[in-house]
Amino acid sequence: MSLLSTAITGIKAHQTALETTGHNISNANTPGYSRQEAVMATNNPLFRGVGYIGQGVNISTVRRVTDEFLTIQLRQDTSTFHDLQTYRESIEQVDRILADDATGLQPQLDRYFAALQGAADNPAYIPSRDVVLGEAQGLVDRFETISRYLQDINSTLNGQLKTSTEQVNAIAKGIAELNEEIVTARGDAAAQPPNDLYDKRDELVRQLSELVEVDVVKVGETYNIAIGNGQPLVLKYDANRLEATPSLEDPNRYGIRYTSKTENLDITDNITGGSIGGRLEFRSEALDLAVNSLGRLAVAFVQETNAQHKQGIDLEGRFGNDFFRDMNDPSLTGDRVYAYGTNKPPNDRVFNVTFENTKELTTSEYTLNLPGPDASRFEVIRKFDGKVVEEGALTGDYPQAIEFDGLKVTLESGTFQQGDTFTIAPLRFAAEDVEKMIQRPAELALAYPVRAESSLSNVGSGYIDQGQMLSRDSKAFAVDGALTPPLVIKFESPTRYSVYDNSDPGRPVPLEPPLENIPFVPGTANTIFTDDPGETIVSSWRARLPQTPAIGNGGPSTAYLYNGINPERFQFFQTDPVTGKETELDRVSTGYGASAYEIAEELNLVEGVTARAYTEVQLSNFSNSTDTSGAPTYNPHNPMEVWVNGFELTQEIPNQNQNIYMDGFPVEVPEEMNPNFLADRINHHYELQQLGITAKSDGETLTITDENGNDILVEMRGDKPQPVISGAPVLPPGIPGNVTDYIDPGDTFEISTGESWSVDPFEGNTNGQLSNLNGYDFSEGGPYRYEMYLPDGRTGTVRLDGIYADGDAVKAAFEEQIQAQLDSPGRAEVDIDEQGNVSYKVFMRVEGTGTQAVSRVNVGGQVDVVMADGIRLETDPEVGGIFNGVPDARSSYMGFQFQVGGRPEAGDEFTIEWNDAGVSDNRNALDLVGLETTDTINDIDGGMTFTESYSQTVEQIGTLTSQAQIRSDASRAVLEGTQSEVDSVQGVNLDEEAARLIEFQVAYNANAKVIAVAQELFDSILAAF
């Protein structure tokens, strides 16, 4: 090769280098462009005699300057940054609306409770009530505004996902086309690399990584690109598709579906990275949290406010209605479950979702699966932790309820099949469902329906507070505008009280079930009534009196005397509140003659059972052989002597230097024994008081009570009633000496346990017209039939068909038939209350013997068994026990509680009645205000108030926002660093390119000079010839 040829190769090579440099300069700002170099190589030399002579230069290739590892790193960093930046931009919107005072909920919540406090300060002032309604509407509007904003974000996100998937598809198609072009170009250009096509493809892959994380595998000259869980988006020359469509589990939220010739999959949960991954992560981690937290707060606020508001009465004396629309309104409960699109037809499943306990609600949504092996098995999975919170079997008998996390999901009807799946989203639209229902200020129920008062005649320092409403759904509020019945709390002693039906204030009667002789701790606040809606009480009969008194010779005896109580067995059963399954809880057996105290002690060992015992004896109708009317009496006269539990009450005791009675006891023993004297002696007796035995007298009846339920032994000695006078009486003036028809009354009284048995009609209806005063015509519509429990366990009957002129005649008719059916010589006494209900008591006569022998009666007590919710009792044998034939356990729940404190004295009373004058009453208003500081949400984590719940949401979103900002800024810095590295390697540096341009220009010119020299040499040669 000649000098000319060598120079020409140089010219061509540097021309190419200049062109490549120019190409670099032209694409200095082209995204994804990689700097190129013309790679020069020496041509093979030719051998001459003097050695190998060079043949110039050639361009072996145009090289693309790149670093594969940096390219991969840039791709990954790009995906990460766009993931975090998209997440950040999205969550910052949520953070702004929740935390800003102008748009957040907390300021309006504060204004609402401040308005309530203003109304509580002056509940009768209408403008204050108007302010409450205005702020309540403001709160409704704020709930709606925030909720709709969050729902709009979800709608926007759905649109963005749709747009992003379309971009993915366009880019994927472009990459597949470039794969084909590159392969074609390599085949057409003698294996020279199509650098610009490589750059275009890498740039498309980088753009794709802005949208979603990709996995790139180079196969030959093509890229295979996978996303998600390995789904191939680009496979050589083919591009598959992504689609953003309403998800199968929830039509309100778009999911990502992958579509190829052979597959159609939902890959939403597998998508990560890029703006799509960021949006999906934002939705599941932050948007759902904000929506459901706001929804939970709305539900708790509405339900708790409604529940409390309905406990009060309004200015018109009516119970309050819902302040806000009930979140369990049927119009709302059916839209909280979404069927998966994969469920088999028919699409006829009907659900209702209600809120049962707001304190147990979580912010999660749930999945209900029917996984098989048949359609009966179900499981409920909490989404945020994947835990199965409930599982079981469908019965096929609908409706069927499933309860978990404070929710009740009712499957109302439909064709439920194996493989069915449903999304349960109870809170998603709850904040938008808040609606104020109260329209008029007078409808605000700021007062309590009940009030308590202390009797003006109380002598102790006891007090009663104004109570706490628990629920209006109790028997006490069965009648509108009334407390049924009104109540009176009577203190039997400083340490015992009873609660009576005070419908007739002059004649209170026991409640059903009875609340009598309940322990009281002086000096502390004692809660009256239960807060357990399921609590029930079953009360035994009082122990049966013997047929006749026992006779003890020679005075009082310490020998045991039967108390009327037989052996009995108790079986307690408990129902599981979740499964409804009943199991035996415990068994207890009591022996012959056991005292009520001993029975109660045994029953108190059963979990969930509280038993209290007391014994009551009533002595009445006292008669004495000393008769001041002038009738003949015993001669000599034996005084009436009385003992209680072995302690004599009728002995002469000097007032000085005695240690039997307390100061103030009655010293003088009356000639005629009477209830007042005996009550005073009992209540002043040191030892009887220590035993818990007290007494009271109304002048006619002496009531003796053992507050612990131990037996009460009553003994009496005195003259025996006689139809003929014994001895030779001294007759008063004017009475013939041969008179023999006087009857000495002797020393007697009647004893009763105070037990009252109802006499219930089962044929004929007097419509409550019977009374103690008026007669009744039983012939009209008769005969009238009644039945009653007899003390020996039998059922007795009464038949009436006559006409009775007055109440005494009516009672006498009942008494005659009842007494004829008693198995003892006792006396029946009938009573008719204000409502026309008939009951009877049995009295036994105790009389003197006229000798030193003592008449003795030992009386057993009564046991009240209080059982917690879900517990019931069975007893046997069927006859002879104190629990045989008693009414079923009845609810003791009143729906309110009061506290009595201080130190009441015996005889002190407190009344509880309907609040007729509630205009200025603010107790329910204060309870509504108190909801602000009450833990009503999230019992699982210890409970939160409304404010704490909202603050937690703001804090959680704020924390996530702060983290997103930090992570986004960090990923930006990483991306910029990687980009700088990439640019330093493969980016175009114009200064360097300008230098190369000069360098290649000089070389080009030099080669041209060589050509000129060669030309001159050639010309010189030609000129030589």
Image (cartoon, helix red, strand yellow):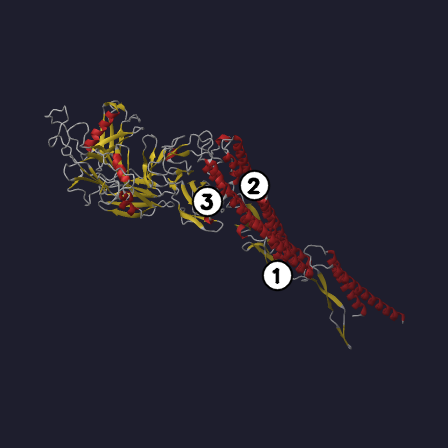
Give percent across and percent down for residue 995.
77, 62
Residue at left offset 74%, top offset 69%: 43
Q: Amino acid at mark 2?
A: Pro
Quadrant of the frame with the N terminus: bottom right
Q: Earlier in the sequence, mark 3 or mark 1?
A: 1
Which residue is under mark 2? 107
Give percent across and percent down for residue 136.
53, 36
376 vs 827: above or below: below
Q: Residues within 10 Å of mark 3 (few under 14, many from 20)?
A: many
Q: Which mark is residue 220?
A: 1
Quadrant of the frame with the C terminus: bottom right
- Rendering quarter of residue 512: top left
In space, the residues marked 3 and 1 are separated at their CA atoms by 62 Å
Asked if residue 541 shows in the view, the reply is: no
Secondary structure of the residue carrying numbered label 1: loop
Residue nearest the viewer, comparing 753 with 875: 753
1010 vs 419: above or below: below
Q: Amino acid at mark 1?
A: Gly
Q: Which mark is residue 484?
A: none
Q: Amino acid at mark 3?
A: Lys
User: Horizontal placement of 1016 versus 639: left or right?
Assistant: right
Residue nearest the viewer, comparing 410 with 858: 858
Asked if residue 388 shows in the view, the reply is: yes
In space, the residues marked 1 and 2 are separated at their CA atoms by 64 Å
Q: Earlier in the sequence, mark 3 or mark 2?
A: 2
751 vs 192: above or below: above
Cβ atoms at labels 1 and 2 below 8 Å apart: no
Give percent across and percent down for residue 466.
42, 37
Which residue is under mark 3? 359
Furthest residue toward front: 656
